[in-house]
Amino acid sequence: MSQTANTDVQLEDEFGLTYPGRAHFRLVGWFCVASAIASVFALLLSLQVVRLGDLLAFSPVKVMRFIADNQLMWRFSCMLNALSSVSKVLVFLMLNIIVDRKARLLTRIGLVLSLIGCAVDLNAQVSLLVVLSDLAVQLKLNSSYLKQDLLQLSWMIINQSLGQLILVSNLMYAFGGVTATIGLFQTRALPKWLFWIGMPVWLLSFSGTIVAFFGQLSLSVSLLLCYSLGFIVWAVSLAIVLDLRARPDHVEAPSQLAEFN
């Protein structure tokens, strides 16, 4: 009995395999579901904001007018997007539990990059939630400041926040997602098709950043909305796979160890 246990440990040390328990698979799956739910609400409200404000035809005056007239919707949209960003980081964190030890370097790199992206994202969302909302109200109420000055200050906040969200935060998520997805691909306990679902999602995110870099903001926003939808599909697919792995009738380590005997 002890010889068998020692053999299992040696095989795990040699090949860097990890065999999480059913509880671990279920725990990570619930984090994926929670992130997908947060992303669904953030996406739906963002689509509503873009549609009602006609924000694809972007102009600072139109944005400020919409924010002033829809304060509650704007604030909830910022908060939900911030929550979605934090939930993505938690998913990256939990992936370290289920990947093989040889792939954990990749998932940890993905976690670090997502933490950077989340920090930048939250900073931008706070600026949009607090500063820009206040400026929009002042502009609507005909503040004592000159309207031209308010518009110029608002444009600076919008420009800085969008730069942080699209050019920095989104890029960090894209690179982090690519490395984490490769880590999942190298994990024997997970199906390889998760890689082929995940890679187009992160490439969409990367494309949104590249397009924004060349000044195509409307196309960039459309690509990022598609990326959000793709992330939801990927997270739900991963949750389903982990739920199947968590079932008692699923054959785990013994069938994998047999390949090396």
Image (tube, grey):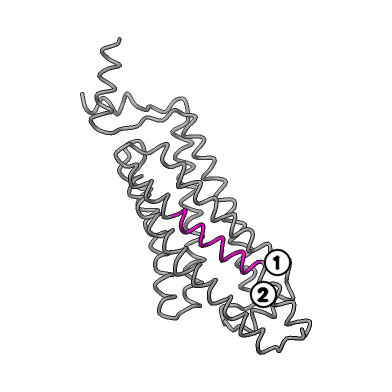
Q: In which quarter of the image is the N terminus?
A: top left
Which residue corresponds to the image point at 62% horizontal and 58% vertical from the top-left?
A: 80
Q: Position of residue 255 (x, y in %)?
A: 31, 26
Q: Quadrant of the C terminus?
A: top left
Q: Where is residue 120 in the image (x, y as percent from the top left)?
A: 51, 62
Residue topped by disc 1: 73
State yes or no: discs 1 and 2 in contact (Cβ < 8 Å). Answer: yes
Q: Secondary structure of the magenta portion, mostly?
A: helix
Q: Is residue 197 magenta?
A: no
Q: Which of marks 1 and 2 is nearer the N terminus?
A: 2
Q: Place residue 167 in its image quadrant.
A: bottom left
Amino acid type indicated by mark 1: Met
Report crowding for label 2: few under 14, some 14 to 19, many 20 or more residues within 10 A (C-alpha).
few
Which residue corresponds to the image point at 42% horizontal and 49% vertical from the top-left?
A: 111
Q: Where is residue 7 in the image (x, y as percent from the top left)?
A: 25, 19
Specify start and end residues of the magenta stretch as a single range: 114-129
Q: Is residue 144 above or below residue 189?
A: below
Which residue corresponds to the image point at 42% horizontal and 36% vertical from the top-left?
A: 97
Residue topped by disc 2: 52
Amino acid type indicated by mark 2: Leu
| Residue that lies at the very extreme toward the left in this rendered image | 261
